[in-house]
Amino acid sequence: MYTTPSNDLRGHVRLACVPGIGSRLRRLLLERFGSPEAVFQADPTELQRVARLGRKLAQEIPSHATSTAADDVLDLCAARDVDIILEGEPRYPGLLSRIDDPPGLLFVRGQMQPADSLAVAIVGARHATAYGIRVAEQLAGGLARAGYTVVSGLARGIDAAAHRGALKAGGRTLAVLGSGVLSIYPPEHEDLADEVIANGAILSELPPLCEPNQATFPQRNRIVSGLSLGVVVVQASERSGALITARLAGEQGREVFAVPGLIDCRVSRGCHALIRDGAKLVESVDDVLEEIGPLFETCTAPDGRQIQHAAELQLGDIEKQVLDAVAARGSDEPVAIDDLVVDTNLAASQVLATIGVLEMRRLLRRHPGSRVSRA
């Protein structure tokens, strides 16, 4: 929800409203001058010493110090229920903060939740085939039912199918736009955007009324991958923007998946190239669920449990009970299996069988003396 802006937020919004200042240049300016206010007060000669900043922009920046653009944006956000999340705030997505070029602020319609740190992106061709649409919906539905948030870009084709698949399964989904959050593109996805807002969020680093252009879509792709533990490419031509997202995911240390297709289909070529280059081949949602490993940090699952490994989302009730009993001991020392039998009130045979399952899932590790610990 929208809150009254601080002077610090107003300064960051003012900086975001200066044409020509993207996320990388913004970061360089703040590293040199310390705050948005100091940037606007700097002499053009000082500004020109910042790498990537040309003479013309250096001359223009001080003139924006008294611009009302930031106040106009803030008033618009207040009127249209657009939230603004500043990098460094506790509610800023933790996964996104880990990439080399995180957006300085996010404009958000809807609500982002801690459980959204358990997210997988599904992206692909705008001119998708019926097969691609079907697979994207199935994968998104399977991920949503497993407890993952589905991330995509609200574009035609695979992106829209991914959002719809998650929504049909009763899950959460995030849409990252290459335009402002009050400038939905493509326009025929206005209704879909409303559904996403009601069951997740749409977000952008661009001011709310910004129109899309050719440069904004590749930029937004780093946010799609940055919000996600992995990226699944369903269909993509050899020059598809989805391949940019996959490349960025690899650079960000995220898992990359690709769905194979017909060898004579143009939108299969990008996926086949990814598979040749080492992407995980996906035939079902299980291929995705099995590959995602330990999380970057402990996070909150949709049911409120604190989890350390994505595999914990797939556990049954008894498996959760045993794993929770290990965690409840609150020690780095291995736990005796006999103690787990007492703590869980389960039969010893059940505990032993469950430990075997958890060990295979790489959630527990056995130690000498019939003891176990978190892996």
Image (cartoon, rainbow, N blue to C red):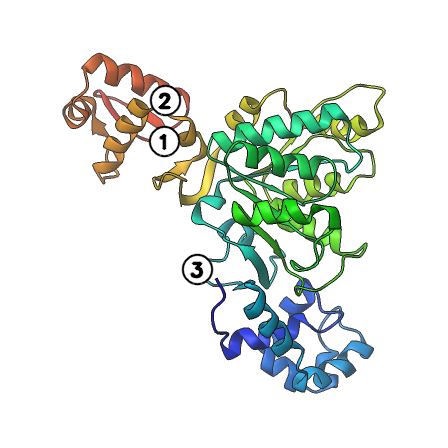
Task: Classify 10 Å Cα crowding around label 2: few (below 14), some (14-19), many (20 and above).
Answer: some
- The x and y percentages for residue 263 are 82, 19
Which amino acid, mark 3?
Answer: Pro
Task: Classify 10 Å Cα crowding around label 3: few (below 14), some (14-19), many (20 and above).
Answer: few
Q: Is residue 147 visible?
A: yes
Marks 3 and 1: which is nearer the front?
3
- The x and y percentages for residue 159 are 68, 39
Residue 191 is tagged as none
Residue 334 sits in quarter: top left
- Ranked by sequence position, the earlier of labels 2 and 1 is 2
Asked whether the beta carbons under mark 2 and mark 1 sit within 8 Å of each other, the answer is yes
Tell me what residue is drawn at x 42 percent, y 31 percent: 313
As measured in the structure, the alpha-carbon distance from the residue carrying label 2 to the one carrying label 1 is 8 Å
Q: Nearer the viewer, residue 90 or 339?
A: 90
Task: Classify 10 Å Cα crowding around label 1: few (below 14), some (14-19), many (20 and above).
Answer: some
As measured in the structure, the alpha-carbon distance from the residue carrying label 3 to the one carrying label 1 is 28 Å
Which amino acid, mark 2?
Answer: Glu
Q: Which residue is mark 3?
A: 90
Tell me what residue is drawn at x 41 percent, y 23 percent: 361
Tell me what residue is drawn at x 68 percent, y 83 percent: 67
The residue positioned farthest toward the left in the image shown: 342
Q: Which residue is mark 2?
A: 359
- Ranked by sequence position, the earlier of labels 3 and 1 is 3
Q: Which residue is mark 1?
A: 375
**Relative to 322, residue 252 above or below:** below
